[in-house]
Image (cartoon, rainbow, N blue to C red):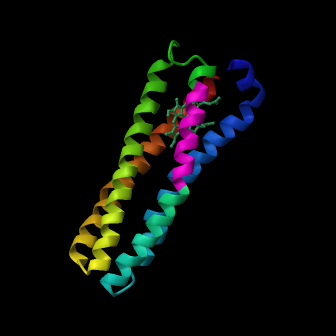
Amino acid sequence: MSEIFTEYKAYIVFIHVISAVVWVGGMIAMRYAAHPSFMKIESSEQRLEHISIALKRLFLIVLPFVVLLFITAFIMIKAYSLSGSEYAGFAHAKEAIWSVMFINLIVMIKRRNRAEKAIVDGDIALAKSQLGLIGKYQVPANIVLGVIAIFIGSYLSSIF
Ligand code: HEM
């Protein structure tokens, strides 16, 4: 594993970093650039519909990168023998962050699906509450966790 990693290190780290860029950057763009613009739409139904469609596209884009992030992290854990090293704590912290972010993402996908169905059924109050939870708490939580993971990554990268 170590020899293969050494040969392809630039590519593996690149895939790891670009995955983090797409996942965390996508959420920041959605929450702080697209969302305020959607809020200008007067009709609640249309507003929620647009937010729901944009979130669906965002989740579809980030999902493959979430998987790639995990695969490259797994390769680096093995290649740097992180688990048995003095940096194991940092690796475990990043694993925990990835896991919480992933579970949070799955819950957001389920919530968005519920909101989409509620819009079709004309239950605007339910759609609003579901999408509201995603925008107010879940996306910001994943942004904060992602930034922490990136900081730990920068620290690890200054060591290896
Ligand atoms: C799943 C557990 C994870 C492990 C074990 C892990 C491990 C690592 C390691 C060892 C490095 C240093 C690579 C090198 O320089 O050779 C790194 C860098 C990095 N990681 Fe992770 N990572 C994990 C999850 C994440 C997550 C969830 C994010 C963000 C969403 C992330 C973002 C980054 C970034 C941006 C870098 C590059 C930092 C730099 O080059 O300055 N990682 N990671």
Q: Residue 33, how many percent across, how many down?
A: 48, 68
Q: Residue 54, how many percent across, how many down?
A: 47, 70
Viewer-side residue, 45 vs 90: 45
Q: Residue at x 44, y 21 (%)?
A: 89
Q: Residue at x 48, y 38 (%)?
A: 149
Residue stretch in magenta: 62-76
Q: Residue 9, how many percent across, how many down?
A: 72, 30
Horizontally, residue 134 falls left or right of residue 88, namely: left
Q: Which quarter of the image is occupied by the C terminus?
A: top right
Q: Residue at x 31, y 82 (%)?
A: 44
Q: Can residue 139 be spotted in the picture?
A: yes
Q: Residue at x 46, y 44 (%)?
A: 146
Q: Give the prevailing secondary structure in the magenta stretch.
A: helix
In the rendered image, the residue lying farthest to the bottom is: 42
Q: Which quarter of the image is occupied by the N terminus?
A: top right
> Which quadrant holds residue 12?
top right
Horizontally, residue 67 falls left or right of residue 133, namely: right
- Residue 75 located within the stretch drawn in magenta: yes
Q: Can residue 25 be spotted in the picture?
A: no
Q: Residue 118, how many percent across, how many down?
A: 28, 73
Viewer-side residue, 63 vs 152: 63
Viewer-side residue, 158 vs 50: 50
* In the image, residue 87 above or below residue 143: above
